[in-house]
Image (cartoon, rainbow, N blue to C red):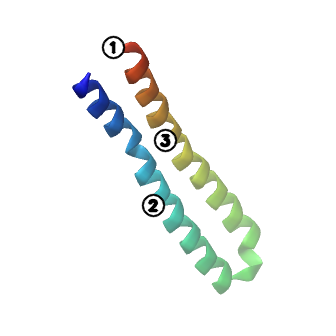
Amino acid sequence: MGLIAIGAAMAVLTGIGAGIGIGIATSKATEAIARQPEAKGDINKALLLGCALAEATAIYGFVIAVLIVLFLK
């Protein structure tokens, strides 16, 4: 059971990378909007797409962790 818990914990660690990535993307988008306010719509579209992809990666990691815990007993 110990190795299963370690594997699940490693799968959940994808959330850390997603959080850092979303934070960096948001900071850069804010800087870009401050420099070019007229491009706000295009910047927001790209930001939302990138955040959705990063969040999907975190969700996949969570699902894998749940599957590991539930089915590898």
When asked about the image quadrant of residue 64, the answer is: top left
65 shown above or below 29: above
Contact between marks 1 and 3 (CB within 8 A): the answer is no
Please identify, in this view, whether the residue under mark 1 or under mark 3 is nearer the observer: 1
Horizontal arrangement in the rendering, residue 39 relative to residue 12 (left or right):
right
Mark 2 or mark 1: whose residue is earlier in sequence: 2
Marks 2/3: CA–CA distance: 12 Å
Mark 2 Cα shell of 10 Å, populated few (<14), some (14-19), many (≥20): few
Q: Position of residue 70 (x, y in %)?
A: 43, 18
Q: Position of residue 59 (x, y in %)?
A: 52, 38
Marks 1/3: CA–CA distance: 25 Å
Q: Position of residue 44 (x, y in %)?
A: 70, 64
Q: Which mark is residue 73?
A: 1
63 shown above or below 14: above
Mark 1 or mark 3: whose residue is earlier in sequence: 3
Mark 2 or mark 3: whose residue is earlier in sequence: 2
Q: Position of residue 1 (x, y in %)?
A: 26, 21
Write the residue at 23% across / 27% down. Answer: 2
Horizontal arrangement in the rendering, residue 72 relative to residue 30 (left or right):
left
| Residue found at the far front of this picture | 1
Write the residue at 49% across / 29% down. Answer: 63
Q: Which mark is residue 57?
A: 3
Going by the numbered disc 2, the residue's amino acid type is: Ile
Q: Which residue is under mark 2? A: 20
Q: Secondary structure at mark 1?
A: loop
Please identify, in this view, whether the residue under mark 2 or under mark 1 is nearer the observer: 1
Going by the numbered disc 1, the residue's amino acid type is: Lys
Q: Which mark is residue 31?
A: none
